[in-house]
Amino acid sequence: MSNQQLDVIGFGNAIVDVLAKCDDAFLEKFAIPKGGMILIDEARASAIYADMAPGVEVSGGSNANAVAAIASLGGRGGFVGKVAGDALGDIFRHDLRSMGVEYETSALNAGPATGRCLVNVTPDAQRSMATFLGAAGLVTDADVDEDQIARGEISFFEGYLFEQPDARGAFVRACDTARRHGKRTALTLSDASVIERQGAVISDFIGDHIDILLANKAEATALFGSPDLAVIAEKARALAPLTAVTRSEHGSLLIPREGETVEVAARAPDGLEDTTGAGDAYAAGLLLGLARDYDLGRAGALGALAASEVISHFGARPAASLKALATDAGLV
């Protein structure tokens, strides 16, 4: 059993990402919403994959990407997520562990294959995702290691996985454990469609269990019922102790329950190539900063730096050392 203290433990879908470039006609052909995410079955996954352009295959999943970025920043990350006992599952496990991420979730030995996300990127750098969850959606409360939760400063939950009833039970158990040990919890809403499907259920979960809420502008609009930033801020303060709202090139807003909203400027990338993983990288920097008691402005700037690096190249994970970049910027 490890005694290592952890900055952030991510709970999320363990997915292998398949990334390729496409045009809008490809998205229309397969009814994939531009800039969004849909869930598909194994047969449809096979059909889309067969027609995709040549690309790259890397271990992924939103919160797995976040803990990978935390490792790149020099942080100590853990991950809880389900893969099958197959070749893709082995690749996923090896990738995370090779980065120094603590990943001990047992593999699924009977049932669906390891999940995969087909990510098609249009020339405007928008990523559109079609996801076959496979084993990823089968996280249960038996996968929650209470000792690991006690060693982590922040337990971080993925909105996509919240939609699976058994996984939701695991989230509640992990949150209750974190609270008993005086640790914090965080949730990323993942996509506006999650709020549309889950409605009051996810709002109640946030109010009952979450200390740090992360959302982009579209997700915040769906959750709080208004695009008006003043309304969002007012309702966010009533729901969670801290809410982060990202707004792409307009930066982010950090809204504490007590105190003034902190506005964080976006960091311009060297060149915009692919927005895949931008929100995950921002979450990594922000949460690592909060885990290490940075003030809100510094933690948000660390998130902006991580997001800037990720969108400057193809793929959802850092291609350069985020720790080196953050050191040069005076953020760590």
Image (cartoon, rainbow, N blue to C red):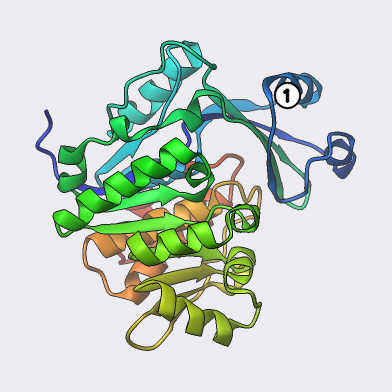
Rendered view: 277 above or below 249: above
Give the residue displayed 14% in from the left and 54% down from the top.
181
- The part of the image, by quadrant, that contains residue 12 is top left
Q: Where is residue 200 in the image (x, y as percent from the top left)?
A: 54, 62
Pick whichever, 194 or 286, lies toward us.
194
Rendered view: 308 above or below 228: above
The answer to whether residue 199 is left or right of residue 331 is right
Is residue 321 among what the camera can see? Answer: no
- The part of the image, by quadrant, that contains residue 83 is top left
Q: Where is residue 29 in the image (x, y as percent from the top left)?
A: 89, 35
The C terminus lies in quadrant: bottom left
- The part of the image, by quadrant, that contains residue 46 is top right
Total numbered circles:
1
Give the residue displayed 50% in from the left and 37% down from the top.
61
Rendered view: 254 above or below 52: below
Judging by the rendered image, the residue that carries numbered circle 1 is 54
The N terminus lies in quadrant: top left
Q: Which amino acid does label 1 sit on?
A: Pro
Is residue 212 among what the camera can see? Answer: yes
Q: Position of residue 276 (x, y in %)?
A: 60, 46
Give the residue displayed 32% in from the left and 35% down from the top.
141
Pick whichever, 173 or 327, lies toward us.
173
Give the residue displayed 46% in from the left and 58% down from the top.
282
Q: Position of residue 180 (x, y in %)?
A: 15, 55
SS type, badge 1: loop
Q: How crowded is mark 1: few (under 14 residues within 10 Å), some or many (20 or more)?
A: few
Rendered view: 248 above or below 284: below
Pick whichever, 215 or 327, lies toward us.
215
The answer to whether residue 152 is left or right of residue 205 is left
